[in-house]
Image (cartoon, grey):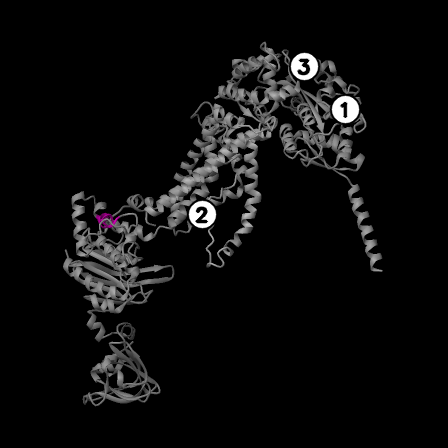
Amino acid sequence: MSDIDIELVSVCKTFGDFRAVNDVSLSVPKGEFVSLLGPSGCGKTTTLNMIAGFQEPTSGEIRIRGNCQTRTPPEKRNIGLVFQNYALFPHMTVAENVGFGLRMKGAPRAEIDQAVKAALKSVHLEGLDARYPKELSGGQQQRTALARAIAPKPSVLLLDEPLSNLDLKLREAMRVELKEIQEKLGMTFVYVTHDQEEAMAMSDRVVVMAGGVIAQQGRPEAIYNSPATSFVADFIGKSNILPVAVKQAAGDRREISIGGTPLTLRVEGDASTLATAKFCCIRPEDVRVVDNGAQPLPDDNVFDGTIAKIVNLGAHLDLWVSVDPGMTIKALVRSNRSGTLKTGQPITVSIGAKAIRLLDR
Amino acid sequence: MPITKRLFASVVFTAGAASVAHAEQLVVNSYGGPYEQIIMERIIEPFQKMTGISVVYDSVGSASQDYAKIKATRGRPGFDVVVMTASQSLDGCREGLLEKFSAKTVPNLVKLNPAINRIAGECGAVHELQYMSLMWRTDKIKSAPTSWSLLFQPELKGKVILPTFQNIMAANLVQALSVMNGGDLLENVAPGFTAMGKLAKQTVGFEQSSAVMETYIKDGQVWAMPFWNGRAQLLMDSGLPVDYTRPKEGTIPLIATLNVPTGAENKAAAMKFVDFFLEKSSQEAWVTGYKVGSARPDIEVPDSVRARQITTEEDLKKLLLPDLSITATKLPEWGDRWERDVVHAAN
Amino acid sequence: MSAVVTEMPAAAPKGRRSSLGGYVPLVPPLTVLLIFFAIPIGMMIGISFQDPKTAAWSLVSYEKFFTDNLMIAGLLRTLVMSGLVAICVTVMAYPVGYFLARSTSRWRAVVFALAIAPELAGVVLRTYGWLIILEDRGFINDALIWSGIVLSPLPLAKNLFGVVVGLTHVVLPFGILAIMTSIQGIDPNLEKAAQILGASRLSVLRHVVFPLSVPGIVSSLLISFTMAASAYATPALLGGARFKVLATMIYEQIMFYTNWPMAAVMALVLLVLMLAFSFAGTRAETRLHKKLNV
């Protein structure tokens, strides 16, 4: 009856002494593209397996479309799954693969053929019906796996790192396509990945997992801009994470000093956040290089340093600036400056007070 | 100095080797089971004590299997003395695979009844005589039978056991039944096969070795069967309620021989052994131990034993004795007929 | 009879200069094969063309073998028995092989040991064991008669049934290994994929596992067939005089009739048959692998 397609209620999974998934609760509304993001071993694949039904939770409940399905076998759950290695049936043609789900449902021949055609069309694989999986390229195999999963029209599609075997260009193209397909079909996608760029690019909501628990969940921008913990800050995007030593609040002014250095930074935020702050997080793109072109704002933190390292990534430069013997900050600088910057060169950087996030863990 | 030392060492070594060689060895191939016990006790141990030759006993193989081995190894089968039958003795002599015996090498040979010994030829020393008896369980068959026809009685359906053709008793049975039904021992054996075909319907099965056949009558599954009389007597003596007889229609004797392959390693010791086995005392011990007959007419045996064994030429004359070399050549043809007429009739 | 080598490992030449050198490591095993295999087989072929009585060149043994209905019956019996063993072994090996390939339970090691351990007891011991169980006064018949189910013993030994039971038991571990290896080679995700698409366990087996395990099935059939066809001890003990197969007939020809030419003919017929089956079997396996795209 609800709008919620998938609901996990306090789900735990232990293997012997090891807690792979520890009290995870999650609600996925219909039509959402949600990513389970985290490093290897964080419990995201185990969670996916439990939603699919390949593993049973040690405790907790799993509801699919409002029905409790904690102990239902996978074949009765009516959800789709795209495997990391595609798992295409090598002895069947593309058409037979894609039609497999409907065949298992006992649908009539004509209906199967029609659904197969439609599914192949939506993944841009028309004309390849009679090919065998080993005759397809990686990208084509991936799309066939997708078509196979969506052909029986499940309301939920699970995807287990489906793009990890593709090269970068293809991966990026597929990201766009997957999102398009998801929006067109209006299907709920639960996407497991360790690639945060991927999760950020496609998801309506990102669920960051670590050590079997959810570290943070929310819209991609929200997580990026307001990471809740240093782990999330470090995992999503690139950041500088610096330990906070002494904090001072005097009237309007809030200041923190960075542990191990004499540096003091002005920050914004309320007193309670300041009181509990243990780390601060600064995105590299918020570290501006000060020169004749750019002027720092009055509230900015400005200090001098030396360029310790430059990595030229083509579109931009990663600069490591040594501000103090104890502190190296990474700055993201646009490439048109590449010619003018060299290692060892002194440089002035400024960081806006607003750009410094305070974290309590 | 060093040369003298080396010389001394080699002399000692050779002397030592020679003395080791002096402790002679002999490999005797015969049968296992009760046979082995008796031969050990009555022949082999006394022989070892008397000559100091150590005997290695090999109980693997029936007479025909041993002969196949001798043939395959061209007379070098690995044993020095073997117990086979007159049939293999004749074959092996002709093929040059068995040593010829003479009065010089085996002095006791002349003590054997010449007619009997001639049957085995120059390469066989007859050490034992048996015949194929009809054995029955006295607790299941009340009146003592006198004829092979017992086996054909309706009451005995499923209570008979027959040998496989690889056991020489099978061919002998065909020959005996052939004579019983108007045929003969060698050429006109058709009546024998016809009778065997009928007998096949009576049998519980076919077994290869005497040892296995014995188990059927021991546990009472079988009530009557053909069996070598020596073994039958042993069973009787062991307390089993059985008895055996020489059927009135006649039966075939088993002329067992000692043979020495031409490639035997310890020929001198082998000849000594053969001679020892044919000694009066040994033959007496053997006859009373294994309950068989002997080809030596001069041995002293209790009358009770004499009554049931072949011990004289006359005894032998009363049996049906086919020309053994011709029998041997007929075996492939008869084996074929056995498969068709007998084994298939049993199915 | 030991397994026949139908393929030789190919040596990869390292370059034009050492293309011959690449074959050097093959010399020792080839020499062994030549001395202990090729030459004796050659001698056996020679013997098969001898007249049993005169040792002159003759085809008499070949003629006899192929025209005598008893000999042909023996050949057919061998083929039928081997075929039945192949089927029984494969059917029984399949579930066990599947379990061993897929199971993660703690019983896996136990089942594996039980499957392989009987081999340690040796063929003769196990065959005698079956004789004791199957014979007329054996365990099964005793139980059946005692419980009144039958009045007289059922013929379970000394016939095709007894031999097939005994041989199936002896050959089963090899079938299990063949099937297990084949199923281990099937990506477990395929079964999961089928499941999530709505296939019941039975459908998964039918549509995914079984078709992809056909090469393993062929392998199991082939191994069982050739092992059964060349078996001696089990048909000798459990078949008896009434159930003769080529192996026991060969033994009889050598040990009783000392007719070596006939024995050689029979042995060569058996050898050629098994070579033919092995060849056909491995061809089929290769083709199947291609067809299944694995």
* B154 vs B58, nearest the viewer: B58
Residue ID for mark 2: C112
Indicate yes or no whether the magenta region holds residue A183. Answer: no
Graded by Cα atoms within 10 Å as few (under 14), some (14 to 19) or many (20 or more), the crowding at tag 2 reads: some
Graded by Cα atoms within 10 Å as few (under 14), some (14 to 19) or many (20 or more), the crowding at tag 1 reads: many
Q: Is residue B128 above or below residue A94?
A: above
* Displayed quadrant of residue A304: bottom left
Q: Gap between marks 3 and 2, in whole Å?
A: 62 Å
Q: Position of residue C200 (x, y in %)?
A: 27, 46
Q: Does residue A307 appear to the left or right of C77 in the view shown?
A: left
Bounds of the magenta segment: A93-101
Location of the N terminus of chain B (image quadrant) = bottom right
1 or 3: mark nearer the eye:
3
* C34 vs A286, nearest the viewer: C34
Graded by Cα atoms within 10 Å as few (under 14), some (14 to 19) or many (20 or more), the crowding at tag 3 reads: some
Residue ID for mark 3: B319
Tell me which amino acid carries mark 1: Glu
Indicate yes or no whether the magenta region holds residue A99. Answer: yes
Residue ID for mark 1: B284
Tell me which amino acid carries mark 2: Phe
Q: Residue at x 79, y 35 (%)?
A: B49
Q: Chain of mark 1?
A: B
| Residue A194's disc number | none
Q: Position of residue C148 (x, y in %)?
A: 44, 25
**Which structural element holds mark 1?**
helix
Q: Does residue B238 appear to the left or right of C19 in the view shown?
A: right
Q: Chain of mark 3?
A: B
* Displayed quadrant of residue A11: bottom left
